[in-house]
Image (cartoon, rainbow, N blue to C red):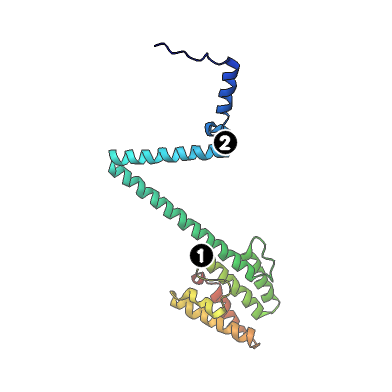
Amino acid sequence: MLQEYAPPPEPELAKSAAEEILSARAYSSVHDLGEGAGLWLKLLDWWRELQNWFAELYRDSELAYWAIVAGLVLLLALIVWHLIWTIKRSSHWTGWKELDRDLPLGRNPEKALQLAADAARQEGRLIEALSFRFRLALYRHARNHPGALRPGFTNRECLKAWTNNPSALAEMSDVVRLLDRCWYAQQECPVEDFDRAWQVLEGKHIE
């Protein structure tokens, strides 16, 4: 039996209905979602492709798969180690610079400390000169051995940095005793003791 069909809609009406349907959010393209959303979707596609590539690599060559994984783990460990080392070194140097706010250290703290020590020595301010020279020795040791010294250490606590060098530890202990006796107890600094301590602080073995 023949069945009668409704006549096709007018072209303009069909076009209008199609545009209305396609304008719905469910039919939006990636570009319609905005540049940010499109970028995230591309990243997700890239991540899925990477996962698929690793899965195929594991199936085709398990040895190559584990070699790449080991390399990535090693690279991640190196990045983390370098980050920690950079943060520690940065905070370390910042702290030591803050110890010498009484000096215009500028961009060359070692030179500033050396000049201050030499000037005080020439003017006969022996214990002050020794204090500057002691800080210079600490600064150089901190540069060569990051982490050995920390801002806020007392003179005696700084001696911990030389525990693995008995001879240097003994000599630095004498310097610290002289500094404590003359600086804090306000005792006179004998020239012979000053010369001996100055010679110790200029020694390369304590750096």
Mark linked to residue 44:
none
Rendered location of residue 158, percent (x, y)? 53, 76
Q: Which corner quadrant of the image does residue 117 belong to?
A: bottom right
Mark 1 or mark 2, which is nearer the start of the sequence?
2
Quadrant where the image shows the N terminus: top left
Q: CA distance from mark 2 to mark 1?
A: 55 Å
Rendered location of residue 95, percent (x, y)? 60, 67
Mark linked to residue 33:
2
Near-viewer residue (94 or 59): 59
* Residue 195 drawn above or below residue 106: below
Rendered location of residue 198, percent (x, y)? 58, 76
Q: Secondary structure at mark 2?
A: helix
* Residue 126 drawn above or below residue 70: below
Residue picked out by circle 1: 144
Residue at the spot 55% in from the left edge and 67% down from the top edge:
140
Q: Most extreme residue toward the right, as rendered? A: 123
Say which amino acid is labelled 2.
Answer: Leu
